[in-house]
Amino acid sequence: MNETMVSEDNAPLQKLLRPIIRALRTAYIQGTNVCKLMPSERAIQLYYKYRRKSYDLQWSMDPGYRKGLRKLVELVVEKGDHVLDVGCGTGSATVVAAPQAREVVGIDLSPHMIELAEEKTKKKSICNTCLFATSVEDYHPDTQFDKVISSFMIPHVKPHLRPMIYSCMFNFLKPGGLVGLFGSRGEVCDVYETREEIIENLTRSGFTDIKLYDVYDIYRIAVAKRPEKA
Ligand SMILES: C[S@@+](CC[C@H](N)C(=O)[O-])C[C@H]1O[C@@H](n2cnc3c(N)ncnc32)[C@H](O)[C@@H]1O
């Protein structure tokens, strides 16, 4: 397993602002603890119904998040891939992956987030995406994907259900396909997985070749493979 640090910008202004940005970023990630208060799919849907408008604005202020999304796509998506974005939300990862992919399918539990994702792709004149309001558990695609990506969905999944969600991702993939997961770290906020937990959960779901990449001081990308012969 290798590990690469995606480092912070070193421009003088950025360096000066770094402690403030880091404090804000950590506070925001701690805010993800709110997921613990959502006991059901209905509660998640209700939360995003009211949260959706401020969602992109808040994330767009953190260069670490934007850089992480680009790194996720760079690590996982190759030209012409058929990609699934699980828990795509407003489509932030979908639109980064689309120029490289043949098609990106985005799924999300929240129809309100899907609406915003549709607006976003339209505004960017991106034509190779398909967006569906469905949970991971209820999604049964006709074809398997070359790649599965997912960004910041895992805090919504109860820890004991995470191997099951990874098994769904495993089954969405063609043999030899890659999954790429972007999120924060359990070492920073306990709604995320620690290094050991993510490795254990992915391994239990059948993934191999697990690689973890640390992004800035609080983010992490995990990449893993569905073996050719499962
Ligand atoms: C924090 S947002 C992340 C959205 C987007 N991936 C991003 O990076 O901005 C989490 C998303 O996961 C979705 N989600 C939560 N549980 C889900 C499930 N079981 N199936 C599909 N989507 C789910 C939520 O509706 C929400 O839009």
Image (spheres, grey):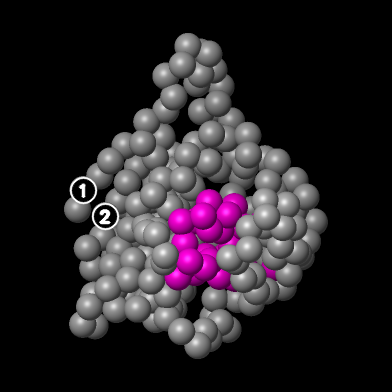
Q: Would you place residue 206 above or below residue 183 in this image?
A: below
Magenta segment: does it hold 166?
no
| SS at circle 1 | loop
Magenta segment: does it hold 99?
yes
Going by the image, does 154 lie left or right of 126?
A: left
Q: Earlier in the sequence, mark 1 or mark 2?
A: 1
- Name the residue that disc number 2 marks: 211
Mark 1 and mark 2: Cα distance apart in space: 6 Å
Residue 114 location, quadrant: bottom right
Frontmost residue, 156 versus 224: 224
Percent across and percent down for residue 51 are 75, 53
| Residue range corresponding to the magenta coloring | 82-110
Going 42% across and 19% down the picture, which residue do you hit? 10
Residue 118 location, quadrant: bottom right
- Name the residue that disc number 1 marks: 2
Going by the image, does 157 lie left or right of 118?
A: left
Going by the image, does 201 lie left or right of 51?
A: left
> For the residue marked with disc 2, what is the amino acid?
Lys
Q: Is mark 1 within 8 Å of ligand 1?
A: no
Mark 2 surroundings within 10 Å by alpha-carbon count, few (fewer than 14), some (14 through 19), many (20 or more): some
Percent across and percent down for residue 106 are 58, 68
> For the residue marked with disc 1, what is the amino acid?
Asn
Q: Are marks 1 and 2 in contact (CB under 8 Å)?
A: yes
Going 53% across and 66% down the picture, which residue do you hit? 104
Percent across and percent down for residue 45 are 72, 67
Frontmost residue, 120 versus 15: 120
Percent across and percent down for residue 28 are 60, 39
Q: Is mark 2 within 8 Å of ligand 1?
A: no
